[in-house]
Amino acid sequence: MLRVVVLGSGAGGGVPQWNCNCEVCTRARRGDGSVTARSQSSIAVSADGENWCIFNCSPDIRQQIADNAILWPKPGQHRHTPISSVVVTNADVDHIAGLLILREKQGFDLYATGTVLDVLVENPIFNVLDGDYVERRPIVHDQPCEVGPGITIEPFLVPGKVALFNEERMMAEQQSLHIGDESENTIGLEVTSAGGESLFYIPGCAAMTDGLAQRLKGAALVLFDGTVWLDNEMVSQKLGAKTGQRMGHMSMAGEAGSMAAFAGLDVARKVFIHINNSNHVLIEGSHERQQANDNGWEIAFDGMEIEL
Ligand code: MLT
Ligand code: MN
Ligand code: ZN
């Protein structure tokens, strides 16, 4: 068995984003039911219903734990957590800032690529995770690794980019690094239970490669990058200067979009996750929502549960 609970279905900033008056954020604040608020990017996975592995650790993790009883400390112990491990897929703020919340001398294992672990080393604030309690374990692409009781991951490189706050420095240092490159900066994961059920978790992906398409063919469940509907929506809504591509995210719609890319892949259950507040797929009854559903996609929401 593999149990998945979506802790946060939004992208960085969440919905509503603190400083944003876009259509989606405005509707979410109005509370008229047309847009549900979403916290930032994270899922919890368990194979035994008792030990949970958190995939990505957003700054909203404190509230996400408070909202999900599966993650509460077990009664009868002074200090306890059902969170046995944390795996991060890149070093973006929405995926690592929550690690600071998980301090308090609590043991768990932290898995990331060497490149992403280096980012934590370079930022000494992450030393609040006491090394006597939190084991940092490097994962290597295409090498399966057990990350919790009955849970194995196989990481793989996907087109992406370095974390925003490192872009200028790392891209100056490594001339060979480009937006959309496959590198240890961004990984996707296949998560498999001891019983053989498996899912893919890919919250950031700049393009569908042949290799990725091969990997995903016939999958039971894929949770995939749903950041933007259109590549230029941030620009056209006057929310920012960057395209989805520039941020390392492929759009849902369009010829180069994920809906088209998944069309022949025969994936049984397709769920968009890491959805930005600029994306009108978040509006119930919108034509974007209709089109996504017509293409067989579900839109993740906080608290969504999936069992395989
Ligand atoms: C992203 O997914 O592109 C990042 O989370 C952006 C950010 O760091 O806010
Ligand atoms: Mn993000
Ligand atoms: Zn907004």
Image (spheres, rainbow, N blue to C red):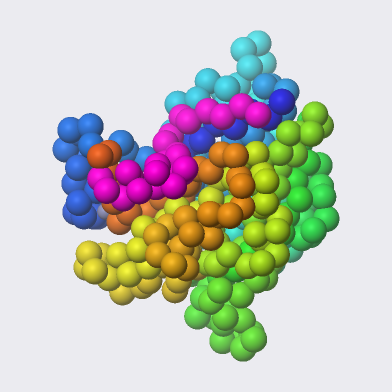
Measured from the top left, where is residue 16 in percent x and y? Answer: 28, 46
Q: Residue at x 16, y 38 (%)?
A: 30
Front-lying residue, 97 or 259:
259
Tell whether 266 sits left or right of 28: right
Q: Is residue 211 left or right of residue 166?
A: right
The residue under the point 71% across, 42% down is 191
Q: Report if residue 192 lies within the magenta region.
A: no
Residue 198 visible? The answer is: yes
Quadrant position of the N terminus in the picture: top right
In front of the other: 286 or 295: 295
Residue 24: x and y in percent read 24, 48
Q: Is residue 108 visible?
A: no
Look at the image and give the residue range highlighted in magenta: 286-308
Instruction: Give residue 152's position: percent from left, percent from top.
Output: 78, 41
For the point 33% across and 45% down, which residue is it?
A: 289
Residue depicted at 70% across the width and 64% down the height:
211
